[in-house]
Image (tube, rainbow, N blue to C red):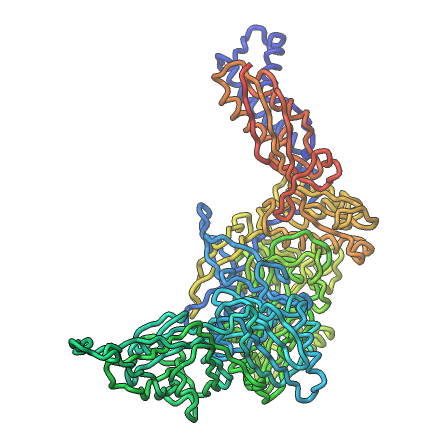
Amino acid sequence: MRPPLIDTRDIKALISRMKYMFPYYTPEWRFTPEDPDAGTALFLIFADMFHENIKRFNRVPLKNFIAFLNMFNVSVFPAGAAAGFVAFRLSEGAGEPVHIPAGTQVSASPEGRGTVVFETERHMLATPASIVEAYNVSPELDSIYRIEESFFQHSPGTDRTHITMFDFTGPENLQEHSLYLGHEGLFNIGETALVELQVINSLKRYSEPSICQRLAYGRNTQWSYWCGEEWRPFDEVLASDNKIILKKATPGMIEKRESESLNSRWVRCRLKDKRINVLGDIVMDGLKISVDYYDCEGLGGVAPGRVFYNDVPRDPQGFYPLGEYFVLYDNFYLSSQEVFSKKGSLVDVKFTLTHIEKIMKSETESGPNFKDIMKSEEFEEPRLPEVSVLTVSWEYWNGKGWAKLFSHNEYEDIFYHPAAGEVEICFKCPLDMEETYVNDHFDFWIRARVLSIENIYTVPSIYRTPWIENIRLKYHYEGEKYPAEHCLIQNNAEYRNMTSAARGESSFSPFYSFDKKIPAFFMGFDSPPVKGPISIMFSIKQQKDSGEKPLLEWEYLRGSGVRTEWASLKIADETAGFTRSGTVVFAGPGDFARGTIFGRDLYWIRIVNPDGRLEREGLSKPMVRGIYMNCTRVVQHQSIKNEMFETVPGPDGREYHLSMFPVIREEVWVNEAGHLGPDDQDRLAAGQPSMIEVVRDQIGNVLEAWFRWIPVEDLSQSSPEDRHYVIDRLTGTVSFGDGRNGRIPPHLGRDNVRINYKIGGGAGGNVGAFEIKNLQNSIVFVDGVYNPDPTGGGYDTETLEKALARGPQLLRHRNRAVTAEDYQWLAREASQDIVRVKCLPNLNREGKKESGCLSVVVVPGEMGGDSFPELKARVERYLKERSASTAVFQDGINVMEPAYLEISVLAELAVNEVDVVALAEKEAVDKLNEFLHPLTGNFGGRGWEIGQYPHISEFYTLLKSVKNVNHVESVSISVIKVENDVGTEINTDFLDNLPYGMVMNGRHRVAVGVV
C-alpha cells in the first residue's frame, strides 16, 4: 500500500487554475491553451516543470518510508532458484560406475527463454545397475504383486502411470503355495481313475495320517490336474491312513505341460488363500504314487485307442482281429495310451469273442457228378475241414523290437475253437514297454501274431474266423507304489525342484512363506549397485498428509559363505519415508550377492515396514510415479569459485562488490595467517574442514589460514571478535564489521578475501519434464540426461510493492509467530512462490478442531503442481524456527494446499434478437471464466481469498451485465472438490464448512434464448 498523495493536482488542474486566475491579474492577455501564443507556451512549460515537482513531492512520504525500512535492514528478496532432479543415462555397454562431480552443469532450452543452466548439488556415482523387477510383498496377507516392467521404461511423451508401494490388492496375486507331482506314465490318464499318494515322514511316522488329513481337507487345498487349458480339480479327495486318494470321475486327458523346463503330466496340490499358516509346518521326506482304473460308471474298462488288422483299421465295437481269411503271420494290433503306459501294473483286456464261419471254395470245384442211377449218399455234400488259428504270439514293443508279452505260452491258443462268451487276458505291463509307430500312429502297442493255423492248406474249407466285440481294458497296482518322476514346489513366486527329496534323500517342506513376517517392497537389479554414493530418485504423487511417516528399513541380499542372507543397508533418505519426492542415497557394499527370488536371479534390495502398519487398510501408502536410477538434485544456478579481493585499511576495505549478481548462496573465506589468537590456534589443532582451511609448508609452518565467515542479517549484535558479514544478494555487495560491531578482516594485501558464490534464480528455471537434456561438458560413458519431473520453486525478484507491504509486518511480528496474521506473513517470507495464504487456528491436519494446532493453507504460484511437497517442507521448516515450542513439539503446525473447488455454472439467458445469441453466449462464458479466476477474478479483479466463495445471486448480477441480455432465466452451480488429483462433487450448502477451499474455474454452459 502506497501513502496518499499530498498534492493531487495534475497538468489539467494547473491549466484550469490558470484559466481561473489570468483575468484577475492580466486581463489584457488571453490564455488560450488550444491555440497557444508565446505566453501560453511559457505557462505550459512552467506547468510541466511544476507538475514534476508535485510528483517528486508526492513521492517524499514513500521515500521516507523506504528510508525508514532501510534503517531496519528490510531489503527486497532476491530471485529464488528452481530445483528439481536430473537422471544421468550411461552409454550402452558401460560396465563400470561413472563419477558425476558436484557442480556438473546441465541445461534446458525452453522455447522463448534461451538456455537455462542447472548444477548438481552433490557428488554421485552413476552405476550401470538398473532396476528390472519390483514386487509388493505381504507375508501376513500371503500376497505378491509384481510391478509391470513398463513402469521402469522412461521416455518423453509417454503416459506415466503410478504404482502404490505396499499395495496388496490387484488383478493377479503371484503368491501360490503348490506341490507339483509329475509322472509321464502313471498320470497318462484320459478316463476315470483313482490316484493314490503315500506321504512319508520317516522321523515322525505318527504324523503321516495327520498330514494326509490336512492335505485332503477341502478348505485347505485343491487337488487338480492339467487338462490342456486349465487346472481341473479332482472330483473327490479322501484321506486314508497315510494315503491321499484322488478320484477322477470325469473323462478328460491329463495333458503334458512344461514347468521349469520339465515336460510331464502333472498333478497339483494348491493351498487355498491364507492357509499357509495352517499347513506351513508340514514336513515330509517321501512321496509315492499308484494309479488304478476307477469304473465309476460301470463301463467295464477303457476303450482301446486304435485297433488294426495288419495295416487295416478296425472298429473297436466289433471287428475281425485277424481278418476274415487269416494267414500265417497276420497281426492284430491293439493300442492304449492310458493303460499300456502303466508300467508294472496288472492289465486286464476283456472282450466278447465268437467265431464266424467263412467258407473257402476252390475255383475248380464242381458240383455233384450226376448219373442215371445214384445212391442217396451220393447226393450229400461232404463236411468241409475247418481252418482255425492254432497259436498266436502276444508281443509288445520294448524300444528295440517286438518282445514276448508272456514268459510262457499263456493265451497262445485263445483263438482256437473259441466258444462264444467273455474272454479276459491278464498280464503285468512290462517295465520296458515303449511307444512306437504302427501304421503311422505313435502309441503304446501290443499285438497278437499268428504262428500256426490248423488245416491251413485245405481247400475248400471252413474258416473259423475270430470276431471280437466290446473290448475293454483295465489296470491296477497291487500295493506297488512308485516315486514321482518330478516333484516341484512353488512358493513365493518361484519354483524349486524337490525330486530327490521326494524320493527319500532328504526332508522338505512343500509349503512355506517369507522369513520375515512383515510387508516389504523388493527391487531387483541386473548388476550389483556397489560403491557410492548411488542415488535413486522416487517421484512421489502428492497425497493428503496424515502426519504419520511409516517406519521403513532398507536391506540388501549379501553373500555369507555359500549362503545368502539379508543385511541392513545404510541410506540417506530425502523422501521422508516416501511422503515427498526425493532421492535415497547409499554406498553399495561389496558383498552384494546374486540370488533367486520370485524366480528371478538378480541382485536384490528390499524396503521393509517393521511395524507392519502399511498392511492395514485405511492408511495412506506411497504412490510412486517413477523410480529413477542415477538421479540427483539440481538447482538453477551457476557457481563462481575463488573470486579474490584485496583488503585495504579504512572504510573501503570493509565493503566488496561481486562481479556477478544476484547471489543465491555464498561462502566468504578470509586468510588470517599471522593474526591468529589462542582460540584460533586451538581451532586449527582441532581441525574443522568446513570452517577452516590450512596451507602448510614442508616442515609444518602455517602459510595460509583461511577462515569461513558467517553471514548475519545485520551487525548490530556482533561483537568485535565475531567473524560476521552482511550481504546484499540483490546487488552482490559484501560488508564486514568496523571493529566494534563485527570483526575487521586483517590487512594482508592482495588476494586476502576469497568468495565462492552462486548466481541465478528466477521463474524461468521452472521447466517441464524431460526439458533438461543437455550436458554443458561431456562426461565419459554418459550418454545423456533428462529430468523426469518438472523443476519448480523458482521465482523472480520481489517487487518493491511487496517489500513495502512486508516491511511493516516484519516490524510488527519481529520474526516470531504469535497471531494468525503473523503466520501468514512469515509463510510469505519463506517463499516468494506463494500467491495466497491463510492461517486457520485450532485446526489439525485432519481438518478437525483441535486446540494447540494450526493449519497454514498455502496456494503456490503453480496451483496443483508437483512441487508443493518441497514448498510445504520449506514453509514448515521456516515457521517452526519462528514459532512457540509448544506448537513445534506437538507437531501442531501443518502446511497444506487448499482444496481446489471447480465451480461450474449452468445458466439460461434471454436476449431480444436472434442475431446476438452466439455473441451473448460467448461473452457470458468469458465473463464467468474471468469472474472465477482465482487470482484476478471476483468483482474489481482482486481475486478470491482462501475460504471465500461466490453466492449464486452474484452470478445473476454478473450475467445481467452481459450486453444484449434482456434477463436471466435461471442459474445453477455445481462444485467439484479436487484434493490430491481426486475430484468429488459436493453440495454447495456445505461450502461454509470448508474454510480451506480455493475457487477455480469449472466447465460452464450457457443456453441463450430469444424473448
**Image quarter (top left, top right, bottom left or bottom right) of the N terminus:** top right
Q: Residue at x 51, y 14 (%)?
A: 913
Q: Position of residue 569 (x, y in %)?
A: 63, 74
Instruction: Decide which of 214, 531 is in the foreground and name it.
Output: 214
Check the image and report above or below for 659 versus 304: above
Q: Which residue in the rendered view is the most extreme toward the bottom? A: 408
Check the image and report above or below for 115 versus 268: above
**Image quarter (top left, top right, bottom left or bottom right) of the C terminus:** top right
Work out whether residue 803 can be spotted.
Answer: no
Q: Which residue is drawn at 53% across and 16% down?
A: 1010
Q: In which quarter of the image is residue 420?
A: bottom left
Q: Quadrant of residue 745?
A: bottom right
Is 160 on the left-hand or right-hand side of 780? right
Q: Residue at x 69, y 27 (%)?
A: 6
The count of marks equals: 0
Is 484 on the left-hand or right-hand side of 336? right
Work out whether residue 539 can be spotted.
Answer: yes
Check the image and report above or below for 274 versus 477: above
Q: Where is residue 793 in the image (x, y as percent from the top left)?
A: 59, 51
Instruction: Decide which of 350, 247 is in the foreground and name it.
Output: 350
Check the image and report above or below for 809 versus 279: above
Instruction: Decide which of 454, 452 is in the foreground and name it.
Output: 454
